[in-house]
Every structure is written in structure tokens, then in C-alpha cells.
Amino acid sequence: MLNRKTEKILTNCIIENKENVYRLAYSYVKNKEDALDIVQDSIYKAMDNLELLKNPDAVKSWFYRIVVNTSLDFLRRNKKVQTMEPEMIDVYCPGAEDVYSDIDLKRTLEDLPTKYRSVIVLRYFEDMKISEVAEVLNENTNTIKTRLYQALQLLRVKLKDEASKELM
């Protein structure tokens, strides 16, 4: 009976957070099809390992952890080439006339090491609390706070450097 109830909780979590989960996967792989594959693999892994979920109340962070780990596994397996979608080529084209600061932020965020980027994405783009980020990444809360602070410092420095390059 407990397994059936847990399965229903997981199913509801997936349905309620489907856009966020897709966005999370996409933030790692930058490709629609790969992100969808990661979401599909994550759902399969979650359903297949449902008995490992000790606390059904923590199903969201447990599932997000599966998505993050599946994304990182995908990146490790496919490290050689990172494809870019056609609409993104126009955005990054060197001859583009419009330069937007959010593009600089996105590019700078992509340049961050994974341990910092994960914290930023989960905290600010997925709007998770520090404790939830810690649970998803399986880290201590203080470690997440430190990484968040360091990540923001790195972003600040890199964005400042980008801005000074544009002024030259």
C-alpha cells in the first residue's frame, strides 16, 4: 500500500514540476532533444528505484537530484561535442548588432564550473530554498551557502570583465 501511495506522490510531483524539470535538464545540456531524453531517463530511474525513497515528503528534491545526476552523467558521456540549436546560433553570431546583458549572464553562467552553476540554477532559476538545494545536490547546507557566495562573486567578476571589454 505504501508503494502505491508513494508512486502516486511521485507521479503528481512529476506532473506538477514537468516544466521546471525540463528547464533544469536543459540548463545543463542546452539542447531540447537531449533535455527531453534526460527527463525521460530520470522518470524511468525514479519509478524503477521508488523503493529507495525513504521519505515520501522529500520526493521533489529526490527527483530533482535524479535529474541533476542524469544530466551530469549525460555531459560526461558526451563531452566531446556540444551541439547548438539553430536559433541559438543567431544569438551568438559575432556579427549580431544587439547585445543584451542577459546573454552575457547566460554565457557567463555556462562558463562557471558545474558545482557553482548547479547551485545558481537551482537557487535562482528553480527558486529553491538553500536547504532544498543542499538536499538535491546531497551536500551540507553550509557548503551550498559557501558555493552560492563564491559563484555570485565569480559571476560578478566575469560580468564586470565582459562589460569593460565591451567599452574598449
Image: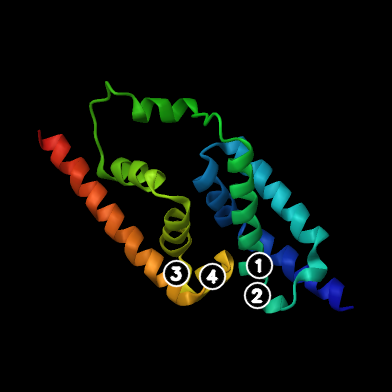
Disc 1/disc 3 C-alpha distance (Å): 17 Å
Q: Quadrant of residue 37?
A: top right
**In this rendering, the label closer to the viewer, 3 or 2:** 3
From the viewer's perspective, is 7 left or right of 130?
right
Categorize mark 2 by other alpha carbons within 10 Å: few (<14), some (14-19), many (20+): some
For the residues marked 3 and 2, what is the alpha-carbon distance in whole angstroms? Answer: 18 Å
Q: Residue at x 32, y 41 (%)?
A: 103
Which residue carries the number 2 mark?
58
Q: Are marks 4 and 3 in contact (CB under 8 Å)?
A: yes
Q: Earlier in the sequence, mark 3 or mark 2?
A: 2
Where in the figure is residue 47, as x and y percent of width and height? 79, 60
Residue closer to the observer: 11 or 70: 70
- Indicate whether 60 appears above or below 88: below
Amino acid type indicated by mark 4:
Glu
Three-letter code, disc 2: Ala
Q: Residues within 10 Å of mark 4 (few under 14, many from 20)?
A: few
Q: Identify the residue at horizontal 51%, vertical 39% (top origin).
A: 30
Residue corresponding to mark 1: 62
Residue occupied by mark 3: 144
Tell me the crowding category of disc 3: few under 14, some 14 to 19, or many 20 or more residues within 10 angstroms, Cα based.
many
Q: Position of residue 10 (x, y in %)?
A: 73, 66
Foreground pick, 8 / 122:
122
Name which residue type carries label 1: Trp
